[in-house]
Image: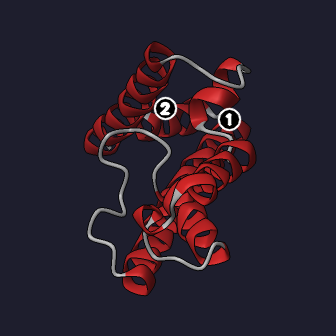
């Protein structure tokens, strides 16, 4: 779609519009490639097969944060913590991580419906990008 617009602008003599569209297209391609590279590196470093956010929730950044919190508490799994330490761990995670739903809704404690809506929005955006790439 964008490539057709660029060609159309060039044929009409609108070079500045064609340049703007080309810059936008290049920006999107570079952004996507950087994300792919980031995911590949994280998969390699963390050896995490589930790295890519498949359910549309917070994804890799949260997993990295959660691992750091585990390390801070000196455990490799929250189940290793007992009683007050376990509560302290989850309070720490809750107080120091802003989920996508919290960011979008502005609520400190979004409902499950809010989480689902944000996940659906993210999945729709992802699908739309994939469709646009196929069109090009």
* Contact check, label 1 and label 2, Cβ < 8 Å: yes
- First-in-chain label (1 vs 2): 2
Name the residue nearer the viewer: 58 or 40: 58
Lateral position of residue 91 relative to residue 70, left or right: right
Mark 1 falls on what kind of element?
helix
Which quadrant of the figure contains the N terminus? top left
Numbered disc total: 2
Provide the residue designation for mark 1.
17
* Image x and y of residue 130, in percent: 31, 41
* Image x and y of residue 89, in percent: 62, 56
Which quadrant of the figure contains the C terminus? top left
How would you rate the neighbour count of disc 2 (Cα within 10 Å): few for under 14, some for 14-19, many for 20 or more?
A: some
Name the residue nearer the viewer: 61 or 112: 112
- Identified at 68% across, 35% down, the residue is 17
- Identified at 73% across, 40% down, the residue is 16
Name the residue nearer the viewer: 135 or 57: 57
Residue 76 position (above or below residue 15): below
Q: How is the image coloured?
A: secondary structure
Q: CA distance from mark 1 to mark 2?
A: 9 Å
Lateral position of residue 37 relative to residue 12, left or right: left
Residue 50 occupies quadrant? bottom left
Provide the residue designation for mark 2.
5
Lateral position of residue 129 relative to residue 54, left or right: right
- Identified at 37% across, 27% down, the residue is 124
Residue 33 position (above or below residue 107): below
């Amino acid at each position: 779609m964008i490539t057709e617009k660029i060609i159309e602008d060039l044929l009409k003599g609108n070079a500045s519009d064609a340049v703007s569209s080309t810059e936008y297209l290049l920006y999107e391609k570079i952004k996507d490639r950087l994300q792919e590279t980031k995911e590949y590196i994280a998969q390699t470093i963390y050896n995490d097969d589930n790295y890519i956010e498949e359910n549309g929730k917070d994804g890799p950044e949260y997993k990295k944060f959660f691992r750091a919190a585990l390390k801070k508490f000196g455990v490799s799994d929250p189940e290793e913590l007992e009683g007050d330490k376990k509560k302290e761990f989850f309070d720490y995670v809750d107080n120091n991580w802003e989920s996508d739903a919290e960011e979008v809704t502005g609520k400190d404690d979004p409902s499950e419906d809010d989480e689902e809506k944000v996940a659906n929005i993210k999945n729709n955006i992802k699908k739309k990008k994939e469709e646009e790439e196929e069109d090009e």
